[in-house]
Each structure stands twice: as structure tokens, then as C-alpha cells.
Amino acid sequence: MARINLNEIAHSYRPDPKEPKDYALKRIHNVWDDGGAYALLGPSGCGKTTLLNIISGLLIPSEGRVLFDGKDVTGLAPEQRNIAQVFQFPVLYDTMSVYENLAFPLKNRKMDSASIDKRVREVADALDLTPFLKKRASGLAADAKQKISLGRGLVRSDVAAILFDEPLTVIDPHLKWHLRRKLKEIHDRFKLTLIYVTHDQVEAMTFADQVVVMYDGEIVQTGTPQELFECPEHAFVGYFIGSPGMNFLPMTLEGNMARINGASVSLPPGYAEMAHKAGGKLELGIRPVYAAISDAPSDNAVKAAVVGVDDQGDSKIVTLRLGEQIFRSKTPEGARVPAEVCYVSFPPEKTKLYSNGKLIKWGCDSV
Amino acid sequence: MSKWEDNKAWFLVLPVFLVVAFSAIIPLMTVVNYSVQDILGPGDRVFVGDEWYRDVLTDFRLHEALWRQIVYSFCVLAIEVPLGIGVALTLPKKGWGVSACLVLLALPLLIPWNVVGTIWVVFSRPDIGLTGVTLNNLFGIPYNFTANPVHSWLTVLIMDVWHWTPLVILLCYAGLRAIPEAYYQAAKIDGASRFAVFRYIQLPKMRGVLLIAVLLRFMDSFMIYTEPFVLTGGGPGNSTTFLSQYLTKMAVGQFDLGPAAAFSLVYFLIILLFSYIFYTVISSFDKGEA
Amino acid sequence: MAFSLSNVDKIVGKETYLKNVSLTFESGSQNVILGRTLAGKTTLLRIMAGLDKPTKGKLMENGADVTGVSVRKRSVAMVYQQFVNYPSLSVYANIASPLRLAGMAKAEVDRRVRETAAMLHIEPLLNRLPAELSGGQQQRTAIARALVKDAQLLLLDEPLVNLDYKLREELRVELQQIFKARDSIVVYTTTEPTEALMLGGNIVVMHEGRVLQSGPTAEVYHNPASISVAAVFSDPPINRIETRVKGGFAELGRILSVPLDGHLTGLPEGDYIFGVRSNHLFLNRQHERDIKITAKVELAEINGSETFIHVIYNGAPLVVQEEGIHQRKLGSEIDIYVRARKFYIFDAKGPLVRAPRIEAA
């Protein structure tokens, strides 16, 4: 187990990178704590796989250093770093039994067979693989195969971290939650550093204690799932997390009020001042679930036209037009949706302000 | 999925049926017909039952040729398959070297079979051939493939290895290239040795192409005719007379059509049997064990 | 146009893929076929397209029998899960291909290709090759190719399943608008209840090769004909609570007694399955008559803007939906508030006995 430091990492696949756009990773400087469950979340092409390969040692970064427990491992290969990895599709030794698959990493490390046996059985038990131990690995279902891949990492007591690269891609949808649960359990039991790369927010947030969101070669936010949802530090996080994503509306300041489309929204005291200081292009952001709509005008509400209603069963997604802007509100099942015109209210504690796409932080500490 | 919609499509298959009928089924039936008759002249034939089969099966020269053939095919497989795998493993995986190697390797495959024989005749001649002269003069080995049965036998074998190992290499290379990179990464992470990677990843993943390579090389070598015919003409003595050459002598040289037909069928059945054995053995690696 | 299937079976070898499927589709209608993997959705689409022949049964188009008529002779377009485009043709040529095959005039082809490309926001990509596109753009191209020929039957087989969820979200909204503007029959398969609800229109719920229920989507959602329909048409699957009704009380999970009031009034004695969707179990008291139960957390699954808490109560698994994003520790205990007025009542064999009243606020 190890604490992983990424020290001023940058990577370019070009031999002589000049501009920022030549870099697949721009500047990554962060710490992955020992025993943490992390998810690396981002859309395809954001650089998350590049970062994963740098951590695992398959790729040497163009700039910066990788430290495991303070030791520089930048130039070391994966096996020298004691990293284990679970890939997108099951990677197994087809001709071996499940037992042999699990024992393989230990055998290669010349462990005595009594200790191997003990360790393999312990891991097989944790992964519910005991009944399959004698079976050929190639004949099992995809979820069992992925558990074996994971098991080959778990058997090693020296493993620094286990990396997962979209490990549930090939799993049937209704079996996924079992594996998600298994991963949580494994994390609790073995207290390992786990890093899970995915583009799927459900996977990232269900799995991780800390989610690292990447966008365009940069880490835009690291936080708990709650923090990402309540206080997206970057407009991209607001958009990417939550479904539908956060609403963003261009605004101007007027005293303690935000002006949107000719209407005023009151802000918590002091927030407007901070926004004034921050300057830049100001936007107001609010999660659809917090933007309540009603058919009666009220003080802090902005008038909008109802464009469409999508019934999702447990809730309704109401699409509104606020001037030029499309705006979504999520209302509970059974709530009445006005036919044409409605008034959107902005609860001050849930209303966030953004300057040039970056959150102006206010009241986010309590999340 | 059944493609039911266009029954007209069956007409498109008709030519293939006709070709197969004329190229395989009708000749085969003719052979079956000949193998149970004694043909004395045009329109003059006698039904002899299984006489030719009994003759053929007790012909000691045929037994000799069969053993020679089995040993030869076994040697061919024993050399070409491991050699092919070995060379395929060392080929470059990317860059300009890939196409250069592949073109060079494919060269022997592009040469007509009788030309291969001719090349080796010239190559091996003790008086003017490169190999012949080198062996005789430089190493002092009295090499003469036209006079020494062992020399001629080995020459035919080496010629086959030169000619056909590239096919095995290409097949293995294709098999190796199809293994996803993740397997190698996983093996590295598991601390597997180079041999373990070969034994547990590369070899199992090459099983399919190896099956094809073994079957092709077995069938081809078991039916070898042109190259030894050009190189040694089956001699000296009968040392390089393989089954198909013996068969040709019988049918064309002595015009014993009946025994030759019986022989052909027995020959055909032997190949079928061996191919079946190879197929079941190799493909059973997949299941079993567990 | 009206399209119908009557008593269609599809049996291959010993496997039954479809059993006695009868459906009718009206032109201009949007239809969703909802079912889990292997429910027979793809088989059904392929038979409708004329790519496969049913083992038994008939396909009718405007009253004419089209069973066994080749797909080429019918007006059908299909979009697949995989991004199927001609790899050597540009996006433009890909979209134009069905029109060119039909021998349409060049100017008209150009007009329609550009119009369709604009609809799917791929106009700037027309000169590129499929390999140069992202997954979402490739699927947009495939959808454009299906839309451009104005086929009377437009079939889409889980078209968004291989896309990132954000792309899925965006494309779903666009597709819904595109479908609404067309007068062809649109049939769309999916495994996701939310997707089915968003697309609206009519729904056909399938399970193991059979049609379980069909009708207007929202109506089927609120009145599932059986526990199987409710299970397929809820994500996560509806919670099942084995219940015995005896002496004026319903014994939930055989241990929690609730009086028979509201829509439970007068329920005959016997064994039932009570079904309740995860969003109808609550973490705080909604009503003074709610019953509090304490359950053990198995997993908190965070899905978009909700959290699904998987719990074990008295040995049985339950899922509770919580608005917003909240992490829960595995093995911790939480209180859940249960109220019978939200319950669907199914016969022990499966069919719906009573549905809760849907409250409009």
C-alpha cells in the first residue's frame, strides 16, 4: 500500500510539445492517500487513461515525477512499482484453473505453496470464488472473470494500489450493482488504495470516496460525490455530474441581486460582493432539482415559458425557456406543471455563481 | 440467422455445386469404380472385389513408402512448427521492419513448386552448387545427394523446411498480433517470466492458427510430389520415393489402374484419419483438463 | 400506414426467441419496446424489418401480407447498437447512400442529405470518414442514414447503449423531437425504463420472448399488469414484499402488520406480493401513519441526481431512492418509512390486483 504523489506531471505524445494544446495532460499535481477509494472521472479524450498509465508505469510522463510513499518511481515499470490492474475486459490465463490464475502472481514471486494456498483461499472467499476454484477460468461468466482479474491483484500482500480501467463495461446491467458492492466490500476489508477510471458518473460516485474529475487534460475538481453535486467548482463538473446537468444562466450584478433576463434573484449576503470582486463573465448555476417552479409569481422568482415536460416516472423534467436560455427543472412525481408560463425560484443556499466557468466559493465547507 | 428471404440466392451456389461435382465427386467415384475392377483394355473389364485392396495392403514396397512418408511428415512438423513459432516471436511488432520481414519471408511461398526443386538441384550439386561445393571442399564432407540416400533424404527435408516454414511463421505472426496488449501488461504486473508469457498467453492464444498450420503442413507434406520428383526423382534407390510418387509409378509407369485406384483411396483415408486426429487433439486442449 | 404482427413465433433449434407476439402500430406513432437483455427485442425488430422470417405468424402492412417479403422491397430503415457505417465513404456519402441506391436526382439527394445532417448537428463533419469521428458522431451518422430515406418503418435497436451517458442524454432529447416530427412508425428498443418514459408514446414490455403488456407508456408505468412488468419497468426493479392478508391486516414480509385501509380495503385473505418502487420508500416521515423499519445498508448507488440505497431488511433486499447525492457506509443502519398507500398489490402468481391511486398535487 502506498500514498501516491503526482508531482507537477505533464505529458505530451509529441516529441517537442510547445503550446498547451500539444499536451494530453497539462499539469497534474495531487496526492492519492494510502487506502483511499478514488475514481478518475471524465469524458473520452480527457486524459484519464494517460494519467492511469502514468500511475501504473506503462507510460513515463514527459515532465514531473511520480512518488510512491515518497520514493521516486517515475522510471520504474509496473511490476517494479507493485501495481495491479483490472482491465476493461477480463484478462485471464485461459488454460489455467481459477485457483492457478489466483496463485500465478505469487508463484512468480517464489512464495512457498502453503502460504500461496492460504492467501488464494482467503481472496477467493472474499470474492465469492471458492466454488469455482477448480474450474477453468475461461468457462466462467464475465462478472466472475473480472473478479478473478481483481483477485490476482488482491492476493499480493505487497500491492501498492489496484487500478481499474472501466472494469464493468462487459457486465450485464442488472449484475453491475453486485460487483459495485463487492468492490466496496473489498475496499473495506483490504484497505487498499484503489483507483477506478470511468466515464460513467454512476460508477465513479458509487465506488469512490473521492472523485477526481478530469476535463481537457486537467483535474478540474477533486471531492466527495456530495461536493461534486452540491458545489461543482467548475462549470464542466456541474454539467457532467447529475442528470440532467446543472443549469447555467448568464447574469449581471445589481447590488445584492443577480439580474437574469430582466428579473432579479436575491443572493446570500456577501456573495454578490465576492462575485463583484471576481469579475469576468458571470453565470448563475443551479441544479434542476433545486430550481422549483410554480404557477404563481413570487418575490425571488423568474418568469419562464414551459417548452416541454418529460415524465421520468419518479419525477418530471420540465424544460423551460428563460429569454434565450434553455433551463431545466426537476419536479417530484405528481407535482402539477403549469401549462405555458411558470415562475422559477432560486433558493439562495443552492444558487452558485461562476466567474469564467469557475465557482466563486461560498458556503461550500459544510457539505 | 437464417437468410430466408431470397430463395434465388440458391442459384448463385449452383456453379459451385457443379464445380465440386466435376472436380471432386465424379473423379472420386471413378476411382472407386476402378478400384474394384481389373481393366484389361478399353471396354474389357472384370469385377475383382477387394482383390486390389488386399494386394495394396500387403505390398511391402508400399509399406516402406508409407513409413518413409510418416517419418518425413513427422520431421517436417517437428521442425517447421517450433521453428515457425520461434521466428514469429522474434519478428518486429511495428515500424518498417514488419513489412520488410514479411515480404522476405513470403518469397519462398511465391516460387512455383517445380522451380523450388530446380533451384535446390542447382544449389546442392556437389560439382557446381553452392551448398554442395561448400560442404565438400570447405568442410570435407563427401556430400552427394544423388548418390547417398541419407544426403538426398535430408536435402528433401531441408528444402521443405526452407519452402514452407514461412507459411507457419506468417500464421503464427498473425495469431500473435491478435493478442490484446492488456494481456502482456497483466503478465508484467503478475511478474510472469518471458517463458510464462509464452506458455500461458501466447501459446494458448495461438492455438487456432497452430491447428491450421499443423493441418496444412501435414496434408501438404504427406502428399509431397513435385519437389522431390524434380530434385531426386525418388532416388537414389527408393530412398526418397514417397507415397504419391509410388502411386504415380504404379498408375502411370506400370498402368496398374486398379491397384493404383485402390491405393489412392487408402491414401485418401489415411490423410483423412491423421487430419481428424490432429484436429481433435489440438482442439481438445480447449476443453478437457479443468 | 398500419403495421401489425399476429401470433408471431420465432423458434431456432430448441430455443424459443418469440412466443405468440401480436402487435399493431399506427403511422406517426412512437413505440418503445422495453425489456432486459435476451427478452427478444432484437429478434422482434429483425422480423419486423424482414431480415428474419417468423417461424409462425403473419406480418401485415396496410392489410397486405408482407410475411417473407424481402427487406429490400419494403420501406424500412434500421439503426443498430453498433455504429454501422460504410468505413470507406465520407459522412456525406454514407447518408446519401440509400438515396443514391434508390436512383434519386443529385440535387434532391444533396438537399435531403444536408437537411438530415443539420437535424443531427453533423453538418460540419460531412467530408470526414467515419473513423475520424467520435462514437456519438458515428451514431449520429448512422441515424441520419436511417432517417434520410423517409422509410415508413423506422426501427432503432438500442441505438444509444454504446454511448457515454452525457451523449446519451443529449441525443435522447434530440431524437425524441425528431421522432415527433415524422409520420412514419418509429419502433425503439431499450432496456432502460427512464429512456422509455422519456420517449413516451406507446410501450411494449417484453420478457423472455413474450409481450407482457402494451399501451400508452405512462399508463403502463402506473398500472403494470403484473409483477414482471413492474420489475422490468422500474429501475432499480420494483421492491417485492411477500405479504399475507389475514384477519383485516396485511402482514408485510410476514412480520409487519398494517391495517387494510385506503386502496387495500376489503382485500380478500390470502398470499400476495406487494410491490413498491424505490422512490416510494422514504427516509423521513411523510405521514403520521408511516411505519418505521430499520434496515442495513448494502450499497449506496449514486445515479445522476439520485442515490439508490440497497438495504437488507429481515433477510429481504429492498432499494430506497433518495433525492440528491449521499454516501452511506456499508453495513450501517437506516430508518425507512413505509406506507401501504404507495403499494401495488399483485397476486402471488403475478397479475396486478390493485394499483395505488396516483395523487396529483
Image (cartoon, coloured by chain):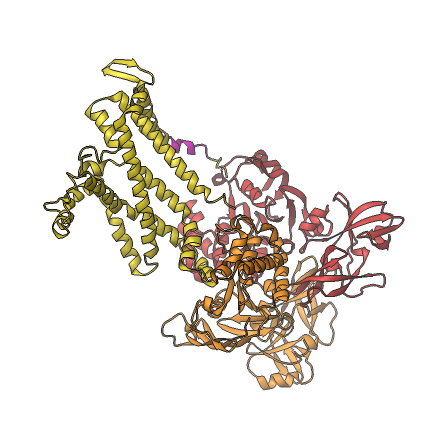
Looking at the rendering, which quadrant does residue A207 occupy?
Answer: bottom right
Q: Along the horizontal axis of the image, is B286 left or right of C16?
A: left
What x and y, as percent, mark residue C172?
A: 58, 57
Main SS of residues in magenta: helix
Q: Is residue C184 visible?
A: yes
What x and y, as percent, mark residue A273?
A: 64, 86
A346 w.r.t. C46: above or below: below
Residue lying farthest to the left in this orientation: B127
Q: Is residue C88 visible?
A: no
C208 w.r.t. A54: above or below: above
> In the rendered image, what is the letter of the chain coloured yellow?
B
Tell me the magenta residue range.
Answer: B6-14
Q: Please state which of residues A126 and B42 is positioned toward the viewer in this rendering.
A: A126
Residue at point 55%, 82% (across, down) = A280
Q: Colour of chain C?
A: red
C214 w.r.t. C174: above or below: above
Residue at point 19%, 38% (across, down) = B149
> In the rendered image, what is the letter of the chain coloured orange?
A
